[in-house]
Image: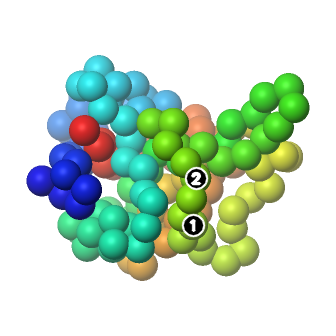
């Protein structure tokens, strides 16, 4: 059991039997009634960072992505909770208004976040939240 009475599970390609693109990772979590982890405060960020530290892993997908509608573009969590906490590496994040497919990952070295230029680039382990 993790913070806020949530359960977390970390997965890599051998556990999920999938290529670990952001979209595949979110789908995998969804098939198990979860989502990629959402982070709403420093305590949860540090818990996930320290829990997932592995010298063989550089980055881990989290559930943050750029959502674009006809009238707005902004970052969203895949579980639809509020985007109310940020822990970006400077000068991140990329401009959400300029790209439709930005997805975020946590750097294992320092727990800070960065974005990919597309949700279909990058193959990382991931953390599901249940």
Q: Residue furthest left?
A: 1
At 59% from the left and 39% from the top, the residue drawn is 119
Which image quarter is the C terminus in?
A: top left
At 18% from the left and 37% from the top, the residue drawn is 15
Q: Which of 123 and 85 lies nearest the eye of the viewer?
A: 85
Q: Residue furthest top?
A: 31
Q: In what element is the residue under mark 1?
A: loop
Per the image, the residue denoted by label 1 is: 86
Local packing at callout 2 (Cα closer than 10 Å; few below 14, some 14-19, many 20+) is: some
Q: Is residue 76 above or below residue 42?
A: above
User: Residue 126: percent from the left, percent from the top?
Assistant: 34, 47
Q: Is residue 52 visible?
A: no
Residue 59: quarter of image: bottom left
User: Residue 56: percent from the left, percent from the top?
Assistant: 27, 66
**Labels 1 and 2 touching (C-beta < 8 A):** yes
Per the image, the residue denoted by label 2 is: 83
* Number of numbered discs overlaid on the protein picture: 2
User: Residue 55: percent from the left, percent from the top?
Assistant: 26, 72
Residue 110: quarter of image: bottom left
Q: Is residue 71 above or below residue 96?
A: above
User: Residue 23: percent from the left, percent from the top?
Assistant: 49, 31
Residue 27 as seen in the image, left or right of residue 73: left
Local packing at callout 1 (Cα closer than 10 Å; few below 14, some 14-19, many 20+) is: some
Q: Is residue 95 visible?
A: yes
At 37% from the left and 35% from the top, the residue drawn is 35
| Mark 1 and mark 2: Cα distance apart in space | 8 Å
Residue 103 as seen in the image, left or right of residue 24: right
């Amino acid at each position: 059991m993790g913070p806020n009475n949530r359960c977390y599970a970390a997965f890599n390609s051998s556990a999920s039997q999938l290529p670990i693109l952001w979209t595949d990772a979110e789908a995998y979590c969804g098939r198990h009634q979860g989502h990629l982890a959402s982070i709403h405060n420093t305590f949860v960020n540090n818990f996930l960072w320290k829990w997932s530290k592995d010298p063989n892993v550089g980055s881990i997908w989290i559930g943050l992505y750029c959502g674009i509608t006809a009238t707005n573009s902004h970052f969203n969590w895949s579980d639809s909770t509020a985007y109310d906490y940020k822990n970006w590496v400077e000068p991140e994040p990329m401009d959400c208004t300029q790209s439709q497919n930005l997805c975020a990952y946590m750097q294992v070295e320092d727990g800070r976040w960065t974005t990919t230029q597309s949700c279909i680039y990058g193959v990382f382990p991931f953390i599901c939240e249940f």
